[in-house]
Amino acid sequence: MWPACEEPKHRVTIAAMATPLRHTAADIAVVRDHVAYEFSMLIRCADLVDRLGTIMPAGEDQTTISNTMVEAFASHFRGLTDFFWPIRATNDDVLASELAPSWQCPPAPAYFKALRGRTNEEVAHLTWTRVGVTVQGKTWPLGKIAEDMRVIFDSYAEAEAVERGATPGATPLPSSLLPSFNPAALVATTMIAPPTSPPTSPATGSS
């Protein structure tokens, strides 16, 4: 479980939540697709970063796209950690415990806690914490995160399918259609210097 933080006034803790809203089967089907989308995008962002060097030349554009994919990866990572291991939630938040109530979610890998904090401080918010982040500290173990999240998602997806009456193993898990990674793969975000403006010539007045 993530560490407790100061409670924003507009949110409530899980323990204090009102009775969850009743959702229709159609609502649940739509939100189930959104959960699968979050996981799919997590995997696809990691895959694109992994292949980037083979599909475009090195340079500032490649760095920009790599950074964009790492930041998108971090955003989807945070969404999935909130889905599986919420710290606090409102009635509007979708939780794994709602879609698969009989499933026992495994504990989050220990290093996920620090990565979620980094997502907040280095991606979602412009913070003073960034000042002290070294080049080595900007490394994201995309391969390891993706494969560890895959294990959790597969377990959830199997349980959720049973909850809605599907035959176990009757359909392939979403993750089986997505790339796999070397867990040792590391990617670091790189600061790109802002463009410098060309010097301007002093204005010349007419005499």
Image: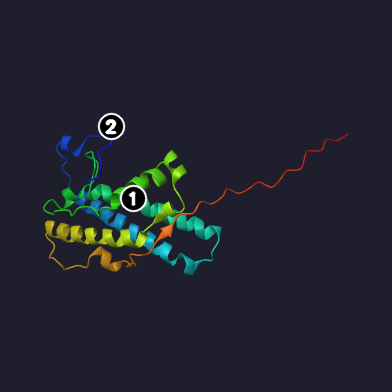
Q: Amino acid at mark 2?
A: His
- Element at label 2: loop
SS for dot 1: helix
Percent from the top left, x then y, of residue 102?
A: 11, 53
Above or below for 22 versus 40: above
Residue 171: x, y in percent? 19, 67
Residue 121 lies, in percent from the top left, at 39, 43
Whether residue 90 sits left or right of residue 69 in the image: it is left
Please state which of residues 77 and 121 is positioned toward the viewer in this rendering: 121
Q: What residue sits right under mark 1 in the picture?
A: 115
Q: Quadrant of the C terminus?
A: top right
> In the rendered image of this protein, does residue 94 appear above or below residue 146?
above
Image quadrant in which you'd find residue 150: bottom left
The residue under label 2 is 10
Q: Which residue occupies 35% across, 65% down? A: 184
Q: Amino acid at mark 1?
A: Leu
User: Mark 2, residues whose alpha carbon is within 10 Å: few (<14), some, or many (≥20)?
Assistant: few
Q: Is residue 127 visible?
A: no
Residue drawn at x 23%, y 58% as measured from the top left: 153
Of the two numbered discs 1 and 2 on the same chain, state the one appearing first in sequence.
Answer: 2
